[in-house]
Each structure stands twice: as C-alpha cells, then as structure tokens.
Amino acid sequence: MNLIDTTAAAAAGARPAVEARPDTRRSLAGLDRAGLAEALAEIGVSEREQRMRVAQLWHWIYLRGVTSFDEMTNVGKGLRAKLEEAFTLARPEVVVEQVSNDGTRKWLLRLPPDIAGDKPHDVEMVYIPESDRGTLCVSSQVGCTLNCSFCHTGTQRLVRNLTAAEIVAQVMVARDRLGDYPGQERAVGPGLPTEGDRLVTNIVFMGMGEPLYAYDSVARAIEVLADGEGLGIGKRRITVSTSGVVPEIEKLGREVGPMLAISLHAVRDELRDVLVPINKKYPLKDLLDACRTYPAASNAKRITFEYVMLKGVNDSPADAKALVRLLAGIPAKINLIPFNPWPGTKYECSDWETIERFSDIVFRAGYSSPVRTPRGRDILAACGQLKSETEKLSARERLALRAMAAAAE
C-alpha cells in the first residue's frame, strides 16, 4: 500500500497499515566457534554446556544450511525458543541476481549495518561453473583503496573491511541459491558442474577489495570455510589473491596456508606503478622475494600469477620473456586474463593472436599459462561494475529490482 492508499483508507475509517519495526536480532550465520559460544553465553547457556551446543549449531548452520532454528531437531525446544528470541540465521539480502548465457552467476548482496548509525552496504560475488568444479569469487572489502587503473572496483572508495562472518555468509548465500546443501533441490542451468556432489567446490578472494588489508577477517573466514565438520572447502581449494601487500604474505602462508595468487600485470616497476599503484610501496623485487619464501608454496601448491592482457601496454613478446625471467625459482603458474572492458576505461583487450603468442612464449619456458576464458560478459562481469550500475538507479528502480528478486525466490 502506497502513501496515497494509506491516507484514503484512514479517511474512510480504516486503520492504516503499521510499518513493521526492523529486526534488530543478530544473525549467527557466518560466526566461528568462538562467536557461537559467545552467543550461547548471552542467552544463559553454561560454559560447561557450550561445547556440545556449539557443535550442534555448527552442524545445522554449516553442514545442513538450515535457515530456521526449528529445523535443529536435536536441540531442545527451550533452547530453540531462546535462540529464536535473540538471534536469526539470516543471510545478506540478495539485491540483484544475474545469470549469464554461459552459466556464470553474479549477485549483488546488501549487508546490514555492522555498527549503530551505519547504513547498509553492497558487495558483489560471482559464481563461475565448469564441468568439474564451481568457483565462487568473494569480496573482502566494501570498495577498495588500491586504485588499480584497469580495475572497475578501483573507482569505488573504500568504506570498510568485511567481517569474517560477512565473508562466510557470501558462501552460504551462494549455496542457498544453488541448492548446494544436503536435501535441497539443486539449481539447473547451462554450464553447472556435472561431476561430484558439490556445486561450490572452490573459493577465490578475487572480488571487491584487497584481502590482505582485511587480513584478520579473511584468516578467520578461511578457518570457518575449511572446517571439515561444516562447509568443508579445503585450503587447497581456497585462493587468496593480493596485489602485493608484502608484509602480510609470509604471515598468510605461515598462519593460514591457503593457495596464493598475485595480481602481477606488469614486469617493470615503472609500468606496474601505474597499473597497480601499491607497487610504489612494495616494488617487484620485494614482492617476488616474498613469493619465493611463501611457506605454503611447493610444486604441488604453485603460486598463481595473474596477468591481465592490455593492448599495447604489457602484451609484447619482450614482456613475456621478461615475465619468465622474473619468476625464476618460484613454483608458479601464470593465468593470462583477457581484459574485461568497462564503461570509462582507457584500456583495450589484446587481440587473440597477441595473447596466444604471449602464452606460447611462457609455456615453452616451462610454465603452465592457461588463458582464462572470458565469462559473464553479458552480465556486467567486470568486478565492481554491477554495484556501480545499481547505485545509478533511482530509488523506485531499486525497489522494483528488489521486488523482482523476491518474486524469483
């Protein structure tokens, strides 16, 4: 009922609708074991009982993916009532969902305020299916500080780091939407994995933000994601991509141990200073020294170097040969990424012949150098672009989009 309808109803003697108060209960979705124990303590569960109750909650939230405390059949009714009164299992709101012709899916999620007086913020995640795997690209920050000149997210100011729970909750939303929990009806559509019993098999921190500037949240989130009693996505299937926050690289390998990816994109400091400005603080020598000593690196766990192919900028045969020399002594593979154009960018994608020539030089030097197949170009697939386009919409258009998303559920 809109404002005019409400006024007319009141004039006719009818009672106008009362707007529901916002739900202020905190969600348990995404919390680690310590966070769940704290929540239980808040509602009076004794310390002696907490370990058992945390295990129960963990099973239902992460292994079974329930959305209601009533589904937790081995938890007593009394405790379920207390949990329901104080908490929810709500995930971030799906504002927009887009499905590409190739099966790539992109979601714009709305996060509730993390502190009193703040406003909701939006982040993106992308699901990229292949026949034998499904990779979910998650965000670690709202916006970004790095200002990489070829990256659309770099045009958006940094608002804040995501919490560990907000990172984990992205994965939970994807599994909800794909029907990837036991007993759920699996999603159908082009490109979805046909092998195995999981649709989300891999996680990459390659969405919005620099993960190593949100180190604590990312590290805690990985521990939740990798826990074998819950979501069970092993650390060899979790990749953290950094633009080169050198002091945190060794720490990540020693304390957490996921796969590592480096957003390299240039083989000379003077060019990388422009493409990836953090290079001015941590130049190539320092970055590659950190890679050579990364504790989790081995021939079985190679570091991935991402290299976006920019026409006439970094795509010459000389660049390819310099890249080979640069990576000497590092167990590495090189992902060549055709540039995904976005409105307002000054860069163009290298032509296919140039990309193949570059790849061949790297391959003949002994490095795996797959060319990443462009995915989801019909759904604003450049990271950060969906958020920017949505922010341009009028309030009425945003409401319409949200209504359409709700109707599709």
Image: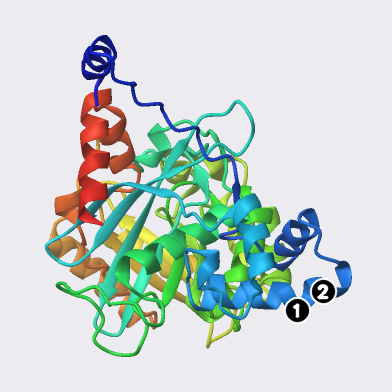
Does 46 sit left or right of 94 as displayed? right
Q: Which residue is mark 2?
A: 49
The image position of residue 137, as x and y in percent, is: 40, 61
Quarter of the image with the N terminus in it: top left
Q: Residue at x 60, y 83 (%)?
A: 229
Q: Is residue 117 above or below residue 43?
A: above
Q: Residue at x 46, y 64 (%)?
A: 172
- The foreground one among 44 and 65 is 44
Q: CA distance from mark 1 to mark 2?
A: 6 Å
- The foreground one among 349 and 78 is 78
Q: Is residue 277 above or below residue 170?
A: above
- Tag 1: residue type? Met
Quarter of the image with the C terminus in it: bottom left
- Residue at the far top in the pictured view: 11
For the residues labelled 1 and 2, say whether their Cβ atoms are less than 8 Å apart. Answer: yes
The image position of residue 93, as x and y in percent, is: 40, 47
Q: Residue at x 23, y 25 (%)?
A: 396
- Tag 2: residue type? Glu
Q: Which residue is mark 1?
A: 52
Residue 285 can be seen in this image: no
